[in-house]
Image: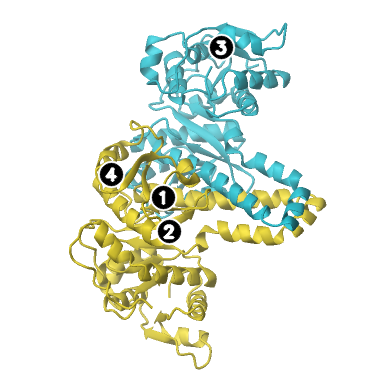
Chain colours: A yellow, B cyan
Amino acid sequence: MGGDHAPDAVVRGALLAIADGVPVTLVGDEARIRPLLPRGSAVQIVHTTDAVGMGEAPVAALRRRPDASIRRAAREVAEGRASCCVGAGNSGAVMAAALFELGRIDGVERPAIAMLLPRGDGGQLAVLDLGANVDCRPEHLAGFALMGAAFSTVAAGVERPRVGLLSNGEEEGKGNEQVREAGPLLAALPILYVGHVEPTDALRGGCDVAVCDGFVGNIMLKTVEGTAEVVGRLLKEEVLRRSSDRFGAWLLQGALRRFRKRTDWASIGGALLLGVRGVVVVSHGRSDANAIRSAILYAHRCARAGLVSAITRQLGAPREPQNAALPTA
Amino acid sequence: MGGDHAPDAVVRGALLAIADGVPVTLVGDEARIRPLLPRGSAVQIVHTTDAVGMGEAPVAALRRRPDASIRRAAREVAEGRASCCVGAGNSGAVMAAALFELGRIDGVERPAIAMLLPRGDGGQLAVLDLGANVDCRPEHLAGFALMGAAFSTVAAGVERPRVGLLSNGEEEGKGNEQVREAGPLLAALPILYVGHVEPTDALRGGCDVAVCDGFVGNIMLKTVEGTAEVVGRLLKEEVLRRSSDRFGAWLLQGALRRFRKRTDWASIGGALLLGVRGVVVVSHGRSDANAIRSAILYAHRCARAGLVSAITRQLGAPREPQNAALPTA
């Protein structure tokens, strides 16, 4: 029931994912969902009329409403009926629901939101935290580094990910107080720590995981989105300026379409909440059906690849997560 | 003498600016500069063999070497022989030299580095601080807001600039501790404060000035640079994939060249150090001759438009800055 275009875009995205072979359960108001499904559809619906609005304070709202759709969706994972869940609504509510229903992996003090961004060298850059924790202590950054390394291996296939600490300069002396204190903590972890990295170098391919607090990460993510948008608009303006250029652009239609697809950061699959005992994807509020489909396939891939077990191993926690033994498809 | 391609690129950039009608004085080692000038050139050289290296701690280096080239350049401004100065070397040294020789404008606690970024709506977004102050208190952000408003008016021609506070969400409750405390301070200033802004909205045109601490600003600036680079590379890859596309790209050569020029953030003119009693441009270390020329023209334009007086007025300081009465060209 969440997101700017819900439930319509969410239902259509789910149908696309089902067509790709991933079984999907829809959680929400059956009276509103059913009419959007093809007649006689066998898609499973978990009915609930409760939902958290975009403007609501998530924790309080979820405490009052144990059957809010996002909380019910997370419960499907917690109780073993689903291997992962996707939410496109109030992102604070997605996180809170995951914490209420799934709980944290042993050793995780602060779950974090992570995403893969396309790099200039063709690789993928994992960035975290993207907004779950706006005020962090240096130890929290160390936790993000461990989870980020496991995430890069599982989601981007990097065997030995190079982990960097996002900073305003590569030298040890650079960084704000938080970063300068976090450096030695990251250097002591059982990961391949490459020191301070600047966003420019990280996006070029200088590391596989960029660690930062949620405020800085959110600024970085939204700057990537905003810059890609500005660059796309300026390109369009220049190309439409002269009729000879318009003919060239017509010839380039296919290439420009592929280019737009690769730079549409919003539809790459959404962000993952790392550190909870289940795979939870926080999808962009403005997700269309295609973005929802990508988010579902992405969540499914991460669950199948054992994201939760990988993080648990990386953190050295002895207990296996609740849903590690579930069938994943 | 500063920058990756010094003194060659600097001298050639200065000659380009002189051809544009701006008189330039070169500061540095005459024995290395003279051979780069056309025979019989009347370009003025202030000779000094001292310089600060890229790796040196700037303040200590400048204290020991009062005749380091960047300090001598700032002194030209302080003593009224120049109306502005440009440095492409160690950016910490450019700042320290400006502080030593020019001093702060009354009421300025922390000078800041500011830059104009192209927005999606065709306007220009002033962002500060970009790295002069990595650890800031909320009051410092209020100072940046005042200086940024004056800067936007002078450098981008915005009569009543909309000033936003960079944050991870537009709602009042968003932001880290620093931002949440700074909000009410900015709201109380005699500027048009528009509240929290996300980078996406700021880059689209949601405000004219985005205020942040130097760590966050530096991350944002380098993310803009990195994203523009990645986007450009992906575009090139897609366009070169098929021969039919290559023909289209050939037709689009002119448009793509204009596009690259508009998105080459490094050559837009460099960053300004705001809050000192003179116009000081901190140019990118990798500046080529064209970027140096842009930086010189930019500094000259800001000096002529009365940047220092505008900041002084905005801060309500009674004294006029030292070089406000100088001829500016």
Where residue A150 appears, as percent x and y from the top left, is 33, 57
In the rendered view, would you say A49 is above or below B160? below
Instruction: Please name the residue that numbered disc 4 is placed on.
Output: A186
| Residue at image location 68% in from the left, 18% down from the top | B15
Q: Which of marks 3 and 2 is in front?
A: 2
A312, above or below B320, in the image: below
Residue in view at x 42 percent, y 57 percent: A115
Disc 1/disc 3 C-alpha distance (Å): 43 Å
Q: Looking at the picture, do discs 2 and 4 lie on one chain?
A: yes
Chain identifier of the residue bearing label 2 in the image: A
Q: In the rendered structure, which amino acid carries the disc numbered 1?
A: Asp
> Quarter-wise, where is residue A167 in the image?
top left
Q: Which amino acid does label 2 sit on?
A: Ala
Q: What's the chain of the residue with tag 3?
A: B
User: Residue, x 27% and y 48% (percent of image)?
Assistant: A142
Label of residue A86 in the image: none
Question: Relative to residue A67, is residue A224 drawn left or right?
Answer: right
